[in-house]
Amino acid sequence: MQAREWLVNWFFYRLDLEDLTDKALRDQVEERMNTAILQFRTPTGRQKIAQSFITIPEAVDALEIWNNLIEARNDINHAGMRPDPNDPDSLISVIQKQVRRIEQLPVPERA
């Protein structure tokens, strides 16, 4: 799913990381993103995420998109094998909505 990879690239850029092809570094960024997603489930999760990504004001929004894309990707890749999977029309709607949200994420120019 290209939107998912784009978000990893966006976090790379916003964290001032350079080599998008560095697999180990990509894994670290994805792990940091996935760890942050787990914080959404806690009462102070959004605040912790904002502090964890203090240099990225839009991090909470981007991670919400990330979370929604993960769920959609998993429904597609695993044929909806979970208690409450999205139906195909809902998946299309979710993905389209997340792509529109991605288009709203700022990409500031680097100095």
Image (tube, rainbow, N blue to C red):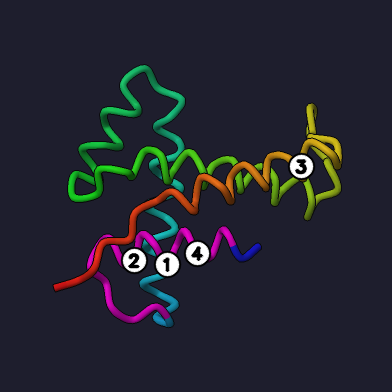
Q: Residues within 10 Å of mark 2 (few under 14, many from 20)?
A: some
Q: Is label 2 in contact with label 1 (beta carbons under 8 Å)?
A: yes
Disc 4 from disc 3: Cα separation: 19 Å
Q: Is residue 14 magenta?
A: yes
Q: Secondary structure at mark 3?
A: helix
Disc 3 marks which amino acid? Leu
Q: Is label 2 in contact with label 4 (beta carbons under 8 Å)?
A: no
Coordinates of residue 1 in the picture (x, y in percent): 66, 62
Coordinates of residue 108 in the picture (x, y in percent): 26, 61
Residue hosting label 3: 91
Q: Secondary structure at mark 4?
A: helix
Residue at image position (41%, 39%) is 61
Image quarter hosting the C terminus: bottom left
Disc 4 marks which amino acid? Trp
Relative to 5, is 34 above or below? above
Left or right: 7 in relation to 43: right
* First reached walking from the N terminus: tag 4 or tag 3: 4
